[in-house]
Each structure stands twice: as C-alpha cells, then as structure tokens.
Amino acid sequence: MTILALEFSSERRSVALARNGELLAEAVQQSNARATNAFGLIETVLGNANVPREEINAVAIGLGPGSYTGIRVAIALAQGWQLARAVKLVGVSSAECMAAQAQSERIYGRVNVVIDAQRGEFYLATWEISAAERRQVLPLTIVSQGDIKARAGQLFVGPQAETPLFPSATMVARLASQNLPAFSDDALEPIYLRDDAFVKATPPRVI
C-alpha cells in the first residue's frame, strides 16, 4: 500500500510518502500557525519519489491536537483526494505520533507528551516507553499550567517542551500502515477536547 501522510498540527509541517512501511520521500517546512505550502510539499514528495498520484492508495492525516488551521487544511486535502481518487483515509493522533517518535529516538521511561492548548492550558498524555513497548498510562486531557508545574522533574516532550519533539508525517505514515481503521470523509475531525461554544449574535433592530 502506498500512503501519502500529512502532518500539519505543529509549526513544523511535513508530508511523507511510504510504501509497504518503507519511506520513499519526506518534505518538511517550518511555518507559522496559519501558513502552509501544502501543495508544494506534496509535489516535492511525489517528485522526489517519482510516484504518480494514481498510485496513492491511502491518505493519512495527523489529527492533532495542535494547530486547528493546519489540521483543517490537511483534512480538506484528504477529503478532496478521496473524492477524486476514492482512496482510504486514516486519522492518527499527533500525540500518539510523538510518543512513537520518542520510542524510535530511545527516549524511555515515563514520558509526558505536552502540546500548547492556548488560554494558559496544555494538552497532556503520558506513556510508559521501553524498547519493546509503548503503553499509554494517562489519556489525552487538558490541564492547567499549574498541573504542568506540579510535574516538575518529569520528562516532557513536545513542540514547546524542554525536550523538543514535533510530530512527523513519516511517523504518521508508519502508524497508518499498522492496519488502523479507515475513516469516511465526513468522520475526519481534529482532536479538540473542548466543548464547542457558540454565541448567537443579537439580531439587528429594525427601526
């Protein structure tokens, strides 16, 4: 299976192409929160791997948490690709992606993956990681800055952590190749733990 992977949840945006678990090409761009040269990254990867679009069987997306705009761009691209080519869609947690990357970089023990959630809050998930196993011991949740400080002395990884780690499209592709379930195009949603809050505008007065 040939997988095109998109990981736009952090300021380090990346696209990767893998076939049967083997990386064919990757392109990375350091970006601000709202700018993504998505099509340029995809063209670079396909060109470097010399793989035509018709050979893509699945599109894997890093679903965050992270940059809501970046994740939405990735989802829109994936949905468009499925509409045009009827490819399989696979969603991967960006926190899980970083835990897998920590394991691949031999960062072992109790590892806290932390991602800025804005509003003075953080997404936090914890794994026990060894060379042979990666086991989640605390599911992804939103915590306060005080909760982070209370864990002083523990190991933190993430885009803004003392041990910097960014989710990568290469790892998204690797995880997606492990028989993860496919999504319908309308089921792909960013991982966003807060409840939606909408305030209806007051109708204008008619004079």
Image (cartoon, rainbow, N blue to C red):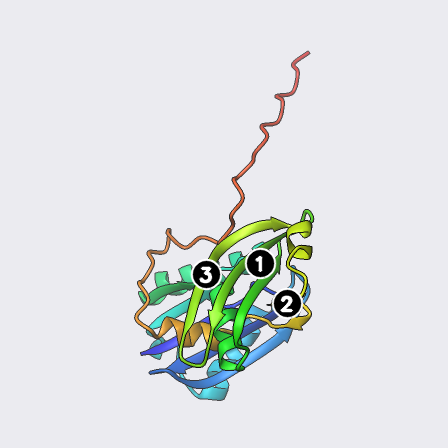
Q: Nearer the viewer, mark 1 or mark 2?
A: 2
162 on left or right of 185: right
Q: Is residue 127 above or below residue 202?
A: below
Give the Cα separation between the discs numbered 3 and 2. 21 Å
Say which label, 1 or 2, has the lower sequence index. Answer: 1
For label 2, the SS is loop
Q: Is residue 84 above or below residue 123?
A: below
The answer, for residue 158, to whether it is visible in the render is no
Residue drawn at the location 47% of the way across and 69% of the way down: 128
Percent x, y of residue 12: 62, 71
According to the image, label 2 marks what residue? Answer: 159
Q: Which mark is residue 66?
A: 1
Give the Cα separation between the discs numbered 1 and 3. 21 Å
Disc 1 to disc 2: CB gap under 8 Å: yes
User: Which residue type does callout 1 highlight?
Assistant: Gly
Q: Quadrant of residue 51?
A: bottom left
Percent x, y of residue 98: 52, 70
Q: Nearer the viewer, mark 1 or mark 3?
A: 3
According to the image, label 3 marks what residue? Answer: 137
Q: Residues within 10 Å of mark 1 (few under 14, many from 20)?
A: many
Give the Cα separation between the discs numbered 1 and 2. 10 Å
Q: Residue furthest top?
A: 207
User: Which residue type does callout 3 highlight?
Assistant: Val
Residue drawn at the location 30% of the way across and 70% of the way down: 179
- Choose between 69 and 135: the one closer to the eye: 135
Percent x, y of residue 183: 34, 58
